[in-house]
Image (cartoon, grey):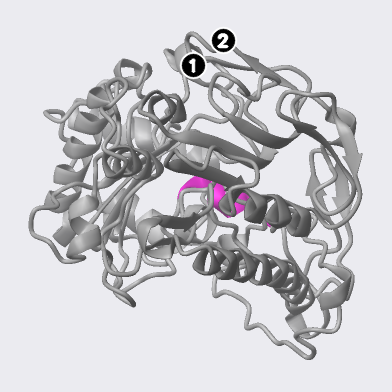
């Protein structure tokens, strides 16, 4: 895959080298449609990927790229962009209902609709009708909103987005975005920000309900698989963040709901972690379409029938390489282009456990019991009782990177040696001086006769 960023959010890609999976559904007889936000590249795919499209193309119309909650430049079926007034979540839904009702599709074909709401992306502007909702909301600050954060990597000791305000309450004066900054409508307190965010979410809730009502009325509900999800989560104070991208669930975990009455057990939940590529593989399988190429994900249709199925034996691999993709990640540059101070990293979740390692030289790994510690506050990598399990997760993570052909797999930097003395320093200090810490690491490596740059390999044991 190769996506080239120009001046954010402008981007281009080679459609031959970066094909999109809905083309396989289209080739299999499906009528395909995309409505809403697009930021993958100037080429939005009409006529190649989509039979019908009403798109807000942020990559192409960069002067309008900030307009998440105002008039947007919309292209319809490859035509010229037209400025559409209103609240985008509302008019996206209007167009989606027209599609469901057969007004903008071939009624003789099965169909696939990708509806891409921009809400609730920053700056979290509510619909005017919702400005009086959720009065007096009060939010308890997350436990680790302020540093230090003992047991976590070095970069985590520097995360200080929120500041102590009156009575020690966390405040955030401005929310920064690539196109500017936003001041909360109600005040800088964490409760004020949460109120505004939930108001933006309410517009999304109301419109999803409106779309589902239209689907019911069309008589297609039981024959339609509905998937509700997002591209990531968003931390509001957890671990000190007001962003996505970091490897913690508050930052990256989106909602995921599959619904099809009569086929998927109503009201059931599944505890198994899955990743975005798994969703794609599952939708391809559900549409009875052959895999168009080697797929990184796994079809979890078995979990839709039985959320506790013993047939499922996969974990979820998630990686972040900043603003570099594809062949640009086949080495580690001297200065990695971090995004918002968050280093390149990989995580692997399976069952109730989650393993994280950053791609920083000589950095500590992280390991969490997500049932006992859903807030990811206690790093079990500091507990020798879990070191054997961490070895296993490390091995599986490497195997998954190899299986999915990660270009950087041969170049991963060394990990932090978890000797007793170093572990105690992490537990007690939380934010040790970097120079002193690296000197200790070098000394420990000399004692252990380890090379300074140890390969990331399942047979190479640092414990």
> Dot 1 surroundings within 10 Å: few (below 14), some, or many (20 or more)?
few
Badge 1 marks a residue whose secondary structure is loop
- On residue 350, the disc is none
Q: Indicate yes or no whether the magenta region holds residue 156.
A: yes
Q: Residue furthest front?
A: 108
Residue located at (54% from left, 69% from top):
217
Please determine whether, in this image, residue 299 is positioned above or below residue 174.
Answer: above
Say which mark, if any, is on residue 14: 2
**Is residue 164 among what the camera can see?**
yes
Q: Are marks 2 and 1 in contact (CB under 8 Å)?
A: yes
Q: Nearer the viewer, residue 164 or 73?
A: 73
Query: Looking at the picture, how far across and down is residue 226, in whole percent?
Result: 44, 57
Residue at the spot of label 1: 18
Q: Can you say which quadrant of the picture contains the C terminus?
A: top left
| Label 2 element class | loop
From the image, give the main secondary structure of the stretch colored magenta: helix
Disc 2/disc 1 C-alpha distance (Å): 6 Å
Q: Nearer the viewer, residue 134 or 129?
A: 129
Across and down, in percent, residue 236 comes to 64, 65
419 within the magenta span:
no
Q: Which residues are magenta?
A: 153-160
Q: Residues within 10 Å of mark 2 (few under 14, many from 20)?
A: few
**Position of residue 84 in the picture relative to residue 235 (left or right):** right
């Amino acid at each position: 895959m190769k996506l080239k960023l120009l001046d954010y959010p402008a981007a281009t890609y080679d459609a031959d080298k970066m094909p999109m999976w809905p083309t396989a559904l289209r080739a299999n007889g499906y009528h395909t449609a995309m409505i809403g936000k697009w930021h993958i590249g100037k080429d939005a795919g009409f006529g190649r990927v989509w039979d019908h499209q009403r798109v807000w193309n942020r990559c192409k119309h960069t002067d309008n790229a900030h307009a998440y909650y105002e008039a947007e430049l919309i292209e319809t079926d490859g035509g010229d962009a037209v400025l559409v007034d209103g609240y985008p979540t509302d008019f996206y839904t209007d167009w989606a209902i027209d599609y469901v009702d057969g007004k903008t599709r071939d009624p003789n074909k099965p169909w696939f609709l990708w509806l891409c709401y921009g809400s609730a992306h920053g700056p979290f502007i509510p619909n005017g009708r919702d400005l009086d909702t959720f009065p007096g909301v009060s939010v308890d600050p997350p436990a680790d909103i302020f540093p230090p954060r003992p047991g976590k990597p070095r970069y985590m000791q520097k995360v200080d987005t929120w500041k102590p305000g009156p009575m020690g309450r966390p405040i955030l004066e401005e929310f920064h975005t690539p196109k500017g900054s936003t001041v909360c409508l109600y005040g800088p307190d964490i409760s004020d920000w949460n109120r505004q965010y939930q108001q933006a979410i309410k517009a999304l809730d109301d419109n999803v309900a409106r779309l589902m009502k239209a689907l019911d009325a069309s008589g297609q509900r039981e024959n339609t698989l509905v998937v509700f999800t997002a591209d990531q989560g968003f931390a509001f104070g957890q671990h000190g963040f007001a962003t996505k991208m970091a490897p913690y669930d508050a930052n990256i975990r989106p909602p995921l709901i599959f619904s099809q009455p009569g086929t998927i057990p109503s009201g059931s939940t599944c505890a198994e972690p899955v990743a975005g590529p798994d969703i794609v593989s599952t939708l391809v399988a559900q549409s009875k379409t052959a895999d168009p190429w080697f797929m990184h994900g796994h079809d979890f249709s078995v979990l839709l029938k039985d959320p506790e199925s013993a047939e499922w034996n996969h974990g979820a691999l998630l990686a972040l390489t900043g603003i570099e993709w594809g062949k640009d990640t086949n080495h580690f540059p001297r200065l990695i282009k971090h995004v918002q101070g968050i280093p390149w990293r990989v995580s692997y979740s399976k069952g109730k456990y989650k393993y994280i390692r950053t791609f920083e030289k000589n950095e500590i790994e992280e390991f969490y019991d997500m049932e006992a510690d859903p807030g990811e506050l206690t790093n079990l990598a500091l507990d020798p009782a879990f070191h054997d399990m961490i070895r296993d997760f490390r091995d599986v993570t490497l195997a998954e990177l190899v299986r999915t052909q990660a270009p950087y797999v041969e170049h991963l930097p060394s990990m932090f040696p978890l000797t007793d003395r170093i572990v105690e320093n992490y537990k007690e200090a939380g934010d040790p001086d970097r120079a002193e810490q690296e000197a200790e690491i070098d000394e420990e490596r000399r004692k252990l006769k380890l090379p300074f740059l140890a390969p990331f390999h399942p047979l190479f044991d640092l414990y």
